[in-house]
Amino acid sequence: MTLTPATFDTFGDAYVAVLRRIHDQPEYDTRGRGKDAVEVPNISFQLTDPIRRSPYLVARRTNIVFNYAEALWYLSGRDDLAMIGYYAPRLEKLSADGIRLTGTAYGPRLFAADGTDGRSQFDRVIDLLRHDPDSKRAAMLVMRPDELVDSGNPDVACTLALQFLLRDGRLHATASMRGNDALIGLLCDTFSFTMIQELAARRLGVDVGTYTHHVGSMHINVLDAARVEAILAEADRAPAPMFPCSEMPDTSPEELATVLWWEQAIRHGGTTLTVDAVARIPVSGYWRQVLLLFEAYRQIRHIGDPVTAGITAALTAGNRWLMAARWPDRIGMP
Ligand SMILES: O=c1ccn([C@H]2C[C@H](O)[C@@H](COP(=O)(O)O)O2)c(=O)[nH]1
């Protein structure tokens, strides 16, 4: 009898295993809100190395720029479509007023002061773990009861809660979701939640532990079947490439604000940033790499030519691989 979830080293391994399970052995056909899907209830997995959070699959065409933008959007407590819609125009249809997102915007629920004691849920669980490291209470709630009041609500939070357990000097995290689209949402949500876990571990000065993901309804939309099959075929052909991955340094709220300031400057700016200009931005090398990705994306969106050779060369090997898989005609491989 096993009472613990399946364990994988990297998210890429877990991702392929989840897609394969639902594709090969679906348990239910569902028809919800106009989308037909195949579903396996109660899927759980655990990652031993949550920092290796990007799957290197050509057929998936992971948008690493969006992944970082969404994580930063959460970490800064924002809900504006202006920022996140620039990286993922598909989110526009989820916004009821064209200005803000509600259920999808986990940031305000986790990282904005919520009117109780001037702190955010995130700040409260960090303070709690500083004083009571063995606590079982370091949980942050996401979905709210009032989200089901309006049956026409287009955007109900899919995440129920995130929990931290600080054990033997390692910060473990558990995400609980009511529903997860295994092709798109699973990848983006795991990316952001493991970033939140890593930020919390650095703030506490402890190591990153395991990441556990539990989902009530894990599903693949029928319209995505061909993409899933392409991913499974690629995983069958050869193991995914491996790249070194960088650890997030301890990042203060002030440094995060500087990263967000530059994100907006790049998004609004009409000028091409050089690698030297990025090197002068007063944030750590880890966050400068993210700003390089934002500049590469700005060039892809606004300029017809390939991304400048300097920016391309300054990307890490893993990021360059992901960008070239997504935008093959815009990113040269070295
Ligand atoms: O962070 C998110 C947000 C949404 N979804 C997916 C799950 C569902 O396929 C769809 C939401 O539809 P409902 O469950 O609200 O009907 O979006 C995710 O996987 N992760």
Image (cartoon, helix red, strand yellow):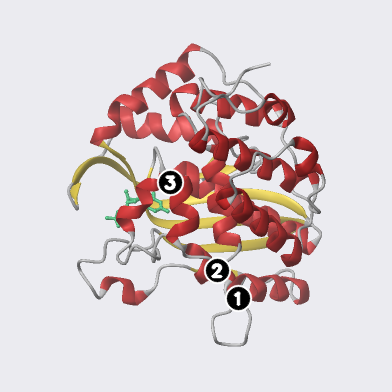
Q: Residue furthest top?
A: 237
Residue 159: percent from left, percent from top: 43, 60
Q: Which mark is residue 88?
A: 3
Q: Are marks 2 and 1 in contact (CB under 8 Å)?
A: yes
The amino acid marked with disc number 2 is Leu
Q: Are marks 3 and 1 in contact (CB under 8 Å)?
A: no
Residue 239: percent from left, percent from top: 56, 18
N-term-proximal mark, 3 vs 1: 3
Q: Which mark is residue 120?
A: 1
Residue 5: percent from left, percent from top: 51, 45
Q: What SS does tag 1 mark?
A: loop
In the rendered image, the vertical position of residue 185 relative to residue 116, given as above or below: above
Which residue is labeled 2 in the image?
Answer: 110
Q: Are marks 3 and 2 in contact (CB under 8 Å)?
A: no
Q: CA distance from mark 3 to mark 1?
A: 26 Å
The amino acid marked with disc number 1 is Ser
Q: Marks 3 and 2: which is nearer the front? A: 3
Q: What SS does tag 2 mark?
A: helix
Residue at left offset 63%, top offset 17%: 333
N-term-proximal mark, 3 vs 2: 3
Residue 14: percent from left, percent from top: 51, 35
Residue at left offset 27%, top offset 61%: 154
Mark 1 Cα shell of 10 Å, populated few (<14), some (14-19), many (≥20): many
Residue at left offset 67%, top offset 54%: 262
Mark 3 Cα shell of 10 Å, populated few (<14), some (14-19), many (≥20): some
Q: What SS does tag 3 mark?
A: loop
In the rendered image, the vertical position of residue 151 relative to residue 15, given as above or below: below
- Camera sees residue 215: yes
For the image, the number of numbered tags is: 3
Q: Tell me the quadrant of the picture where the C terminus can be found.
A: top right
The amino acid marked with disc number 3 is Ala
